[in-house]
Image: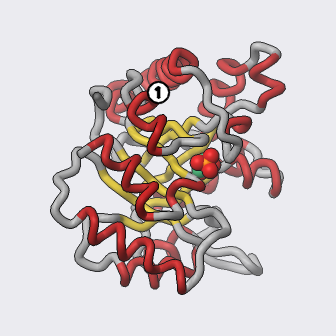
């Protein structure tokens, strides 16, 4: 049973995976979801170069397309970067910011993530802001402190329930097959909800809080039924239509 709260979102983050040949997967997913009545929104976030193609394959379906990252500026001398405005023009309705792979591999701080999230919101898109502790931080009992600090630092002032999604992704659970216990997930999501209410007032209750990290068809039901879990950010299991469908079906 999915938990109560805002309409959930199941988003698939392809990371640096995908090709023209792989377009058959979103095409298949759209066909499989055609007559399914869902109680959740579904999104795929392919590499930027595939956004237009995925968008075109999904034309007429209810599946939305998102970006994986953007620069904080709308345009300018930033070789190799793309802006939220560009992703919007290509058909995205949301952009992931602050994924732990960006924080680790590209040195992105909360301040940078905050600027990126603000740019996404300013472009009229939803910012999917990722936060989460490392294994070392969890082992030393710092999870709640780290998550609170990242949330406060990464959430732009003036954020609303309609332009903001939070994704809690414990770094040690990403791509490892490991997941926190349901009690641990519930504890962190409750903390995020409480902090959101403090930061945003009433709107805080309407922000979707996704769980991410080794979500698969076999554990999705249990994870998604935890209080304050309003969907999932899925990596590996979003690459194959059948696996992704197995997760989405929690909300069918
Ligand atoms: O953005 C997605 C997350 O990093 C989760 O990845 P994963 O489902 O492969 O563990």
The residue that appears at 73% across and 54% down in the rendered structure is 102
The reply to whether residue 234 is visible in this rendering is yes
Q: Quadrant of the N terminus?
A: top left
- Quarter of the image for residue 158 reads top left
Q: Looking at mark 1, is its residue's CB closer than 8 Å to ligand 1?
A: no
Q: Residue at x 45, y 60 (%)?
A: 94
Task: Please say whether residue 114 is visible from this viewpoint.
Answer: no
Tell me if residue 36 comes above or below residue 17 in the rendering. above
What residue is drawn where x is 34% and y is 27%?
205
Taking the spot 46% from the left edge, 83% from the top edge, the residue there is 52
Within 10 Å of disc 1 (Cα), the crowding (few <14, some 14-19, many 20+) is: many
Look at the picture and state if 43 lies above or below 79: above
Name the element at disc 1.
helix
From the top left corner, tell me how far across and down residue 51 is, in percent.
49, 77
Q: Indicate left or right for 105 with 146 as reference.
A: right
Q: Does residue 101 sit above or below 15 in this rendering?
A: above
Q: Nearer the viewer, residue 185 or 203?
A: 185
Q: Quadrant of residue 217?
A: top left
Estimate the x, y position of residue 152 in percent, counting from the top left. Answer: 61, 31
Q: Is 136 rendered above or below residue 246?
A: above
User: Which residue is identified by label 1?
Assistant: 196
Left or right, 202 with reference to 214:
left
Q: Position of residue 208 (x, y in %)?
A: 39, 38
Where does the image place residue 110, in percent across and percent down from the top left?
A: 70, 42
């Amino acid at each position: 049973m999915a938990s109560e709260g805002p309409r959930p979102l199941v988003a698939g983050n392809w990371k640096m995976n995908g090709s023209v040949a792989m377009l058959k997967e979103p095409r298949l997913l759209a066909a499989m979801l055609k007559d399914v009545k869902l109680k959740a929104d579904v999104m795929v976030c392919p590499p930027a170069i595939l956004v237009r193609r995925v968008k075109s394959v999904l034309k007429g379906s209810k599946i939305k397309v998102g970006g994986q990252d953007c620069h904080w500026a709308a345009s300018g001398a930033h070789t190799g970067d793309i802006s939220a405005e560009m992703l919007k023009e290509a058909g995205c309705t949301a952009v992931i910011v602050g994924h732990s792979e960006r924080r680790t591999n590209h040195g992105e701080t909360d301040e940078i993530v905050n600027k990126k999230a603000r740019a996404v919101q300013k472009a009229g898109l939803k910012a999917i802001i990722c936060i989460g502790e490392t294994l070392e931080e969890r082992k030393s009992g710092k999870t709640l402190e780290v998550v609170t600090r990242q949330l406060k630092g990464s959430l732009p002032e003036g954020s609303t329930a309609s332009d903001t999604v939070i994704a809690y992704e414990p770094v040690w659970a990403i791509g490892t097959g490991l997941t926190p216990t349901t009690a641990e997930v519930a504890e962190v999501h409750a903390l995020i909800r409480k902090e959101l209410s403090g930061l945003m007032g009433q709107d805080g209750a309407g922000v979707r809080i996704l769980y991410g990290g080794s979500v698969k068809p076999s554990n999705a039901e249990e994870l998604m039924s935890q209080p304050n879990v309003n969907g999932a950010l899925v990596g590996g299991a979003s690459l194959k239509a059948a696996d992704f469908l197995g997760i989405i079906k929690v909300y069918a």
